[in-house]
Image: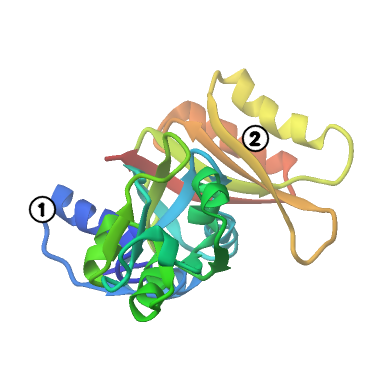
């Protein structure tokens, strides 16, 4: 069973793509938020969530859930994001629109067109929710995918309104850790004193392990303290990775290994 974002979301599209790639018939269950997907994965099944956008960077809700919960990454999938402006079919042109619904990321990724349109912007939790609202609003439109526009019977007023090339990376998550793949994900906390991060990262340098991502997020419980999200090249089955992580744990306050994963 797969759990993913709202029906009509980009996560929904990626889940269908993933099902085709692995050539398995699966039951797909939509949830309203990323956090809900994680909660369901803890009970049963696997999920599909966005983790990073090429224009806006990491998806913080996904990172915070990965850091807090015993959920692991198995696969990553990249998808080119094409955003459309869509509305109820009774709207004939853009001039009739008074407001535009969408989620934070789609709004940020379409700023140039939105500035030119000069309409009221209403932020909602997902692009599929935006499409649903637009389907009921004779003065509203949505920034969403073509998939969502078709699902909610909308007419597309403008195609490809995103600002340039826009790619989102999605991950397939599970309650079981995977040790095979070309990359490995981990989270750690270091002591809040000079040289702590250097001591942690030098273990990768010593073994010529490339870091493909490093990003810090605030620890919600302690002000001005952070956890680090890191992706490295190599799998948990490799000796050099095993040795690096064995030494890394000595130089961290807390370390959470989220598994090795495959790009498909």
Asked whether residue 163 appears in the rendered view, the answer is: yes
Horizontal and vertical percent position of residue 250: 71, 41
Identify the secondary structure beneath mark 1. Answer: loop
Local packing at callout 1 (Cα closer than 10 Å; few below 14, some 14-19, many 20+) is: few
State the colouring used for the structure image: rainbow
Judge from the rendering whether residue 256 lies leftward or rightward of residue 237; answer left or right: right
The residue that mark 1 highlights is: 23
Horizontal and vertical percent position of residue 115: 57, 49
First along the sequence among labels 1 and 2: 1
Outermost bottom residue: 136
Residue visible at 39% across and 50% down in the picture: 170
Q: CA distance from mark 1 to mark 2?
A: 40 Å
The residue that mark 2 highlights is: 247
Seen from the viewer's position, the closer of residues 251 and 148 is 148
Judge from the rendering whether residue 131 lies leftward or rightward of residue 90; answer left or right: right
Horizontal and vertical percent position of residue 46: 32, 64
Seen from the viewer's position, the closer of residues 90 and 198 is 90
Name the image quarter holding residue 204.
top right
Q: Is 56 drawn above or below residue 32 in the view shown?
A: above
Q: Nearer the viewer, mark 1 or mark 2?
A: 1
Asked whether residue 1 appears in the rendered view, the answer is: no
Name the image quarter holding residue 176.
bottom left
Mark on residue 148?
A: none
Seen from the viewer's position, the closer of residues 8 and 238 is 8
Horizontal and vertical percent position of residue 168: 42, 45
Residue visible at 48% across and 44% down in the picture: 53
Identify the secondary structure beneath mark 2. Answer: helix
């Amino acid at each position: 069973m797969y759990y993913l974002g709202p029906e009509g979301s980009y996560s929904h599209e990626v889940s269908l793509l993933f099902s085709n790639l692995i050539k398995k018939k699966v039951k797909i269950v939509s949830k309203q938020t990323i956090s809900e997907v994680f909660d369901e994965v803890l009970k049963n099944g696997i999920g599909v969530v966005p983790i990073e956008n090429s224009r806006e960077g990491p998806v913080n809700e996904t990172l915070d859930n990965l850091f807090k919960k015993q959920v692991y990454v198995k696969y990553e999938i990249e998808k080119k994001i094409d955003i459309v402006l869509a509305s109820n079919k009774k709207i004939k042109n853009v001039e009739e629109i008074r407001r535009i619904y969408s989620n934070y990321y789609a709004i940020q990724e379409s700023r140039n067109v939105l500035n030119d349109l000069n309409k009221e912007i209403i932020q909602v939790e997902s692009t599929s929710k935006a499409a649903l609202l637009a389907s009921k609003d004779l003065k509203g439109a949505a920034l969403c995918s073509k998939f969502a526009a078709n699902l909610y019977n909308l007419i597309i007023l403008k195609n490809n309104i995103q600002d340039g090339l826009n790619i989102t990376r999605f991950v397939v998550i599970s309650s079981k850790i995977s040790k095979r793949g070309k990359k490995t994900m981990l989270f750690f906390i270091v002591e809040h004193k000079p040289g702590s991060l250097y001591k942690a990262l030098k273990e990768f340098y010593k073994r010529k392990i490339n870091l493909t991502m490093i990003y810090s997020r605030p620890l919600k419980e302690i002000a001005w303290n952070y956890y680090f999200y890191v992706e490295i090249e190599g799998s948990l089955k490799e000796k050099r990775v095993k040795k690096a992580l064995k030494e890394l744990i000595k130089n961290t306050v807390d370390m959470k290994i989220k598994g090795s994963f495959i790009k498909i």
